[in-house]
Image (cartoon, helix red, strand yellow):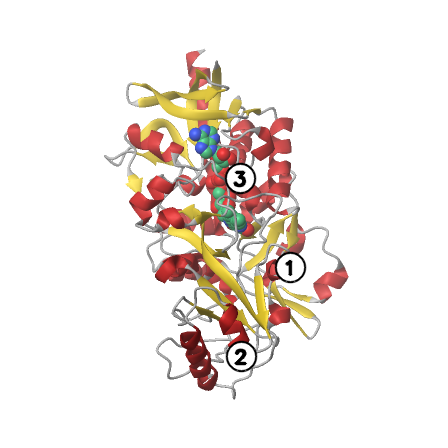
Amino acid sequence: VRADVVVVGAGNAALCAALAARERGADVLVLERAPEEECGGNTAFTGGGFRAVYQGVEDIRSLATELSDDQVAHSDFGKYTEADFFADMARVTESRTDPELCEILVTRSFDTLRWMQSKGVNFVPKYRRATTEVDGIFKFTGGLVLEAFGGGTGLIDSLTKAARDAGVAILYGARATGLVMDGARVSGVSYRQAGADTKVNAAAVILACGGFEANAEWRTRYLGPGWELATVRGSRFNTGDGIAMALAAGAMSYGNWSGAHADPYGLNAPPFGQRDVGGAYQKHSFPFGIMVNSSGERFMDEGEDFVAYTYAKTGRRILAQPEHFAYQIFDQKVAPLLQDSYRSRYAAKISADSLEGLARRLEGVDEPGFLRTVAEYNSAVCTEIPFDPATKDGRCTTGLAVNKSNWANVLDTPPFEAFGVGCGITFTFGGLKISSESRVIDTEGAPIEGLFACGELVGGIFYFNYPGGTGLMNGAVFGRIAGDTAGRAAVQQKASTR
Ligand SMILES: Cc1cc2nc3c(=O)[nH]c(=O)nc-3n(C[C@H](O)[C@H](O)[C@H](O)COP(=O)(O)OP(=O)(O)OC[C@H]3O[C@@H](n4cnc5c(N)ncnc54)[C@H](O)[C@@H]3O)c2cc1C
């Protein structure tokens, strides 16, 4: 078997790579480990949100073509400049993001969405999750404005259709097991399908098969003790295979190997993501309440920033608590502001008409400790500062060991509500080093001939934390670049050997 370009994985990064390679005229084969009914990788579990630079409402309209005049009149999109995106990446990664890769991500973001649109991906504003309604106007906060129509599954459906229409062949249930080497260059991939081992020769191989978040042993080895206890929010198939095969071929390891995107996730969630349940277990409204651990104590500033900039580091904070869980506590003043997932039938809500009653129902939590924490917190809220969920309102607490910086409200309006959360891991940050052309770099700092990578398995872009909506954007930008470079190289090679 032979193809010009073999892409490993069939998520967002992989399918963008396959489409771009096909644009260059290459014959493309995609190998996907999951069976077709579980295809789409982590991408299929997403809400489909993309963080991209835009200059104002006209840029949004050019991508979200179904947006009506009435919707525009009732929306405040603001703008999100290159400088904003750079600043967000620098802030959340504590200035560790690879400057070259980050610049490519930021400066190619909008153009890449237009390119995806040209392939049949439709976008809509993210009204459900990214807005706060103030006086009938939906205000977008946190730089994350657009999502793919149909969310993650819609995105996968559109990209898969586009790939098939373009003539890309996709094999499901085909797990890549190793790179075939011809001296120092990569000349193909071996894979296992239906129990049989096969190999496919190719001028270029693009690894786009995710991080190692679904591999409990690697999580414990690289993220640290306790991480085997995290719940996997997405695909069960991302076990680090692509990283392992590239390292075996001499690739350099790069980035934040002890870091991961992990957020507050329902204690009652199953061990891996379930596509039919969607985002029902995620619990991202903690900025409007407080979080307590088993001692009944608060342990972090729940209102440090808009949730798009804090949720991805909060899972780690929860995992670090005694017994690895926390409760999020709200009262009725903020209950209408909570995301839909808090009202889902998968939300294990505990409610009570008094704080004492709630304390008795919080399984595993020290009752006196909890009541003391709430009393101290309530008396520390600066009530003279107005509450405004649409801005960083500065309504804080003062004098506590752990203060809250924004959106602090006295917990005084029953019924009180509590939601148990653990750590849900989304994806890992460490991986392979790539060049600006998405070529995999070896331990000597030189590109490995014939090998490319994109998506979650690339290291160096995210450290410690992550601005929401950047994973898909990153996969699309570098997927497109990987496919373009690999496709061109493969076609040139074919022409020169004719
Ligand atoms: C619940 C959830 C919600 C999220 N929401 C968002 C969001 O709204 N916006 C955003 O930007 N990001 C979001 N993310 C993060 C986002 O999912 C990832 O950053 C992105 O989808 C990664 O894309 P990818 O193509 O690199 O990997 P994936 O989409 O995971 O694709 C990797 C593919 O490789 C396959 N594979 C693995 N091993 C092999 C092998 N050996 N051989 C062949 N195939 C293999 C897997 O089966 C999988 O299909 C979310 C993640 C989760 C879990």
The residue under label 1 is which amino acid type?
Arg
Other residues around mark 2 within 10 Å, as few (<14) / some (14–19) / many (≥20): many
Q: Mark 1: which secondary structure?
A: helix
Indicate left or right for 141 with 62 as reference. left
Graded by Cα atoms within 10 Å as few (under 14), some (14 to 19) or many (20 or more), the crowding at tag 1 reads few
Disc with the residue nearer the chain's start (2 vs 3): 3
Please state the horizontal and vertical placement of residue 247, each as a whole percent of the image: 30, 32
Identify the mark at residue 128; answer none if there is no mark.
Answer: 1
> To which residue does mark 2 refer?
411
Q: CA distance from mark 2 to mark 3?
A: 42 Å
Work out whether mark 3 precedes mark 1 in sequence or the reverse, and give the earlier one. Answer: 3
Q: Position of residue 68 (x, y in %)?
A: 75, 57
Mark 2 CB in 8 Å range of ligand 1? no
Mark 3, ligand 1, within 8 Å: the answer is yes
- SS state under label 3: helix
Residue 171 at what x, y percent from top left? Answer: 54, 23
Q: Who comes first in sequence, dot 2 or dot 1?
A: 1
Residue that badge 3 annotates: 12
Real-space CA distance between mark 3 and mark 1, rounded to the nearest whole angstrom: 22 Å
Few, some or many residues within 10 Å of mark 3 (<14, 14–19, 20+): many
Residue 444 shown left or right of residue 269 in the figure: left
**Label 1 residue near ligand 1, CB within 8 Å:** no
Amino acid type of the residue tagged 2 in the rendering: Leu
Q: Is residue 404 at all visible to an observer of this figure? A: no
Mark whose residue sits in front, 2 or 1: 2
Q: Nearer the viewer, residue 274 or 199?
A: 274
Three-letter residue code for mark 3: Asn
